[in-house]
Image: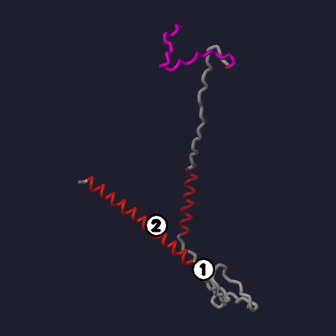
Amino acid sequence: MAESPWVPDGTQPSPPPTVWDDPVSGLVTGATYEAEPLRIDLATPVEPDLDEVRRAVDAALSAEEQVDEAPVIPAPRRPSAPPAAPAPSPPGIVPPNPRAGWPRTPTVRLPARIRTVRSGGGSGGVSAAVAVGVVVALGVIVVIIVSIVASLVDTITTLFH
């Protein structure tokens, strides 16, 4: 085989390096192994026995025909006895709530709430300052929105005139 006259000058990539046989890699005589045929086992669907299918359909249809008879109406429920009244609790103890999560019945008296008198204490000034801050913030937002809309209208009118 003749040497290539091409000499790399840096404008093209270098040619691939020469490949030498590797005696450790196995077959070095140049012969090839015969390729094994590729075989894939595919599952095939099982065909149902048509006699069994017909028998199952006939059984289902006969069960439906039996259902067409007069339906069985259950007997009405007997009224249950009213629940027994709970035993009265000792004085000063509130009886347990018969239904958890529900408000107590109006017959149960709860102790009167003790009213506490709040002093003005300076909380009025804080709430007034917060209210003024909210009003100022809303005013700034409104001014920004109005200026954006005015700029948009001016741009659109300039484009179409």
Q: Kindly indicate the quadrant of the structure image that contains residue 156.
A: bottom left
Examine the rendered structure and indicate whether residue 42 appears above or below residue 93.
above
Tell me the quadrant of the picture where the C terminus can be found. Answer: bottom left
Helix, strand or loop at label 1? It is: loop
Q: Main SS type for the magenta part?
A: loop
Left or right: residue 138 versus residue 36 is left
> Which residue is found at the position 61% from the left and 18% from the top?
32
Q: Look at discs 2 and 1 and give the one toward the viewer.
A: 1
Q: Position of residue 103 (x, y in %)?
A: 63, 83
Q: Position of residue 39 (x, y in %)?
A: 60, 31
Q: Position of residue 108 (x, y in %)?
A: 67, 89
Residue that lies at the very extreme toward the top in this rendered image: 2
Helix, strand or loop at label 2? It is: helix
Viewer-nearest residue: 117 or 37:
117
> Which residue is found at the position 49% from the left and 69% from the top?
133
Viewer-nearest residue: 53 or 135:
135
Q: Position of residue 102 (x, y in %)?
A: 63, 81
Q: Is residue 3 magenta?
A: yes
Left or right: residue 136 versus residue 107 is left
Examine the rendered structure and indicate whether residue 5 appears above or below residue 128.
above
Q: How many discs mark residues in the rendered view?
A: 2
> Which residue is found at the position 54% from the left and 72% from the top?
69
Viewer-nearest residue: 124 or 65:
124
What colouring does the structure picture have?
secondary structure
**Mark 2: amino acid:** Ala
How packed mark 1 is, by other alpha carbons closer than 10 Å (few <14, some 14-19, many 20 or more), is few
Give the magenta-colored segment's residue range: 1-24
Instruction: Tell me the number on the disc at residue 121.
Output: 1
Instruction: Tell me the number on the disc at residue 137.
Output: 2
**Mark 1: amino acid:** Gly
